[in-house]
Image (tube, rainbow, N blue to C red):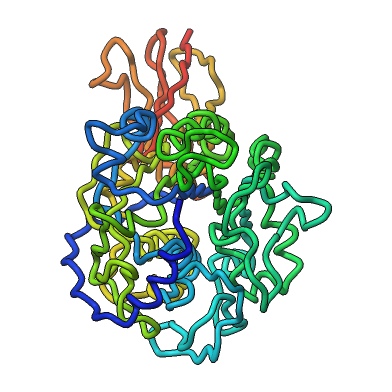
């Protein structure tokens, strides 16, 4: 558990010098990336990638079982120390300032909040001003899309305290800095309550809610948000070790929480249809012998701190690693490319056709590419219908085909072919191929010479094929 003296040390360390950022490796191509419909971001706490994903990891589900089903991204970096500056960066692209680096023990307004040319605001404080600073949540709403924040234990003190959008009053101390028995919610792990663009709007009460609401929202695609940010409580995210309620805490606790809470997401209709789960950590270790303040991707320090590394001066928040799961990712993928929290924000914005916020718009910053999204079909199957399904030999017949798919490019320009299964490379007659129009429809008019069984098949690169039989009497 972090002591408050560590947070105090951040303020002193911020007066140090900024070390140069490590060089970023070239990311894979972003051409022809699949469109993700629903994103789930799960953030755990304070672990170095070498510990989480190493051979002696106490988290076998996260370190072994999940990467085998998706992608391991070992060179994923946090952008600073301590916690809050990372959470802020994930949703807004704002770089650390000395108070977010100290986890904003006192919940104060960010002032003066003067915008800069690179999307940052000048000043210091906790709650960023509107309209100068927006978040990906605001962007999604403005584009007619949806978002939800799910915070474990947020409603633990209801009705004495709000059950949703729970945060300190501006100008007061944050009473969620330490866990209590029965209430292990931490406001600093809920990024949305650090922006006036959210807390001053009814959207906060509606969308920044307790984790207990997630299960019901997952039941249908229509009730699942496009963007979902999930924070376990101070015990289940691995922050506390041991926990205030006697549980062991640490990385093993977080692994158990994932094993219990991730399957309903993976089984949900939204995930199965072009969904994406990103599991990462806010920061690496910030103190002691294993402290890591390294960075990647030519991370800028920003205008409000000389050292994003805080208590261990350095350019970033260390290498934390990430695991990503999606029908659009091949099992067992490993990407050695360098990414960070700004990369994640940029990738999400690109996916939903949103402009880049803050340092998500950093020149040369690579979003997630085909090194991760290497299954362009996303298991997206084309559904073929053919009419008629029975025909008479010795006559000319017009067959009408319809291809259905929720993925537009798996409906239009699809090759439809009539095949004789007994001679698949030698169709019995001319005119046995066609391509679907924009509406997914196509026709083939052909002469049927003799009885037999034909098969109509659709094919397009990046889409899962389908076929139906046609009987010729």
Residue 28 sits in quarter: bottom left
**Where is residue 251 drawn, in percent x and y?**
40, 38
Task: Locate residue 1 relative to residue 151 in the image: left or right.
Answer: left
* Nearer to us in this view, 240 or 416: 240
Residue 108 or residue 413, whichever sits in front: 108
- Image coordinates of residue 330 in percent, x first then y, are 31, 35
Q: Quadrant of residue 192?
A: bottom right
Which residue occupies 64% across, 76% down?
196
Q: Is residue 450 above or below residue 376?
A: above
In the picture, measured across the screen, residue 73 lies left or right of residue 454, that is left
Please tell me whether residue 230 is drawn above or below residue 271 in the rendered image. below
- Asked which quadrant contains residue 426, the reply is top left
Q: In percent of the image, x 46 and y 88: which residue is there?
A: 122
Q: Nearer the viewer, residue 26 or 424?
A: 26
Between 410 and 141, the one nearer to me in the picture: 141
Residue 400 left/right relative to 252: right
Residue 463: percent from left, percent from top: 39, 37
In the rendered structure, the answer to whether residue 67 lies left or right of residue 250 reads left
Report the residue that reaches farthest toward the right. 159
In the displayed structure, 313 sits above or below 221; it is below
| Residue name at image x 72 percent, y 47 percent | 156
Number of numbered discs present? 0
Quick check: can you spot residue 190? yes
Residue name at image x 36 percent, y 42 percent = 323
Where residue 31 appears, x then y in whole percent?
29, 57
Query: Is residue 461 in view from this perspective?
Result: no
């Amino acid at each position: 558990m972090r002591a408050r003296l560590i947070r105090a040390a951040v303020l002193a360390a911020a007066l140090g010098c900024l070390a140069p950022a490590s060089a970023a490796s070239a990311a894979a191509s972003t051409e022809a990336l699949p469109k993700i419909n629903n994103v789930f971001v799960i953030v755990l706490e304070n672990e170095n990638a070498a510990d989480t994903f190493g051979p002696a990891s106490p988290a076998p589900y996260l370190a072994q079982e999940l990467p085998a089903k998706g992608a391991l991204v070992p060179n994923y970096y946090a952008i600073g120390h301590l916690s809050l500056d990372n959470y802020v960066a994930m949703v807004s692209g704002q770089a650390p300032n000395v108070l977010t680096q100290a986890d904003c023990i006192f919940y104060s307004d960010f002032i003066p909040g003067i915008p800069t040319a690179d999307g940052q605001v000048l000043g210091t404080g906790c709650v960023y001003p509107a309209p100068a600073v927006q978040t990906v949540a605001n962007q999604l709403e403005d584009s007619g899309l949806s978002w939800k924040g799910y915070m474990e234990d947020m409603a633990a003190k209801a009705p004495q305290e709000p059950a949703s959008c729970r945060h300190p009053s501006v100008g007061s101390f944050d009473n969620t800095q330490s866990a209590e028995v029965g209430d292990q919610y931490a406001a600093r792990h809920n990024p949305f309550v650090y922006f006036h663009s959210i807390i001053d709007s009814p959207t906060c009460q509606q969308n920044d809610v307790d984790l207990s609401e997630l299960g019901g929202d997952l039941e249908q695609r229509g009730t699942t948000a496009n963007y979902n940010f999930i924070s376990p409580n101070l015990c289940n995210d691995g922050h506390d070790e041991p926990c205030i309620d006697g549980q062991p805490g640490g990385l093993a606790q977080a692994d158990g929480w994932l094993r219990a809470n991730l399957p309903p997401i993976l089984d949900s209709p939204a995930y199965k249809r072009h969904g994406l789960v990103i599991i990462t950590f806010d920061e690496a270790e910030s103190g002691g012998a294993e402290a890591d303040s390294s960075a990647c991707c030519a991370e800028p320090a920003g205008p409000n701190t000389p050292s994003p590394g805080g208590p261990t001066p350095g350019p970033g928040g260390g290498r934390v690693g990430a695991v990503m799961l999606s029908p659009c990712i091949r099992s067992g993928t490993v990407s050695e490319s360098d990414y960070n929290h700004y990369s994640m924000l940029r990738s999400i914005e690109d996916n939903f056709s949103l402009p880049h916020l803050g340092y998500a718009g950093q020149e040369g910053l690579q979003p997630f590419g085909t090194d991760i999204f290497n299954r362009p079909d996303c298991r997206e199957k084309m559904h073929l219908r053919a009419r008629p399904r029975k025909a008479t030999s010795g006559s000319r017949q017009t067959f009408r085909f319809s291809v259905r798919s929720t993925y537009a490019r798996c409906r239009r320009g699809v090759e439809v072919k009539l095949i004789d299964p007994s001679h698949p490379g030698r169709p019995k007659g001319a005119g046995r191929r066609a391509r679907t129009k924009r509406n997914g429809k196509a026709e083939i008019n052909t002469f049927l010479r003799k009885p037999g069984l034909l098969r109509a098949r659709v094919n397009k690169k990046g889409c899962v094929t389908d076929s139906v039989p046609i009987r010729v009497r």
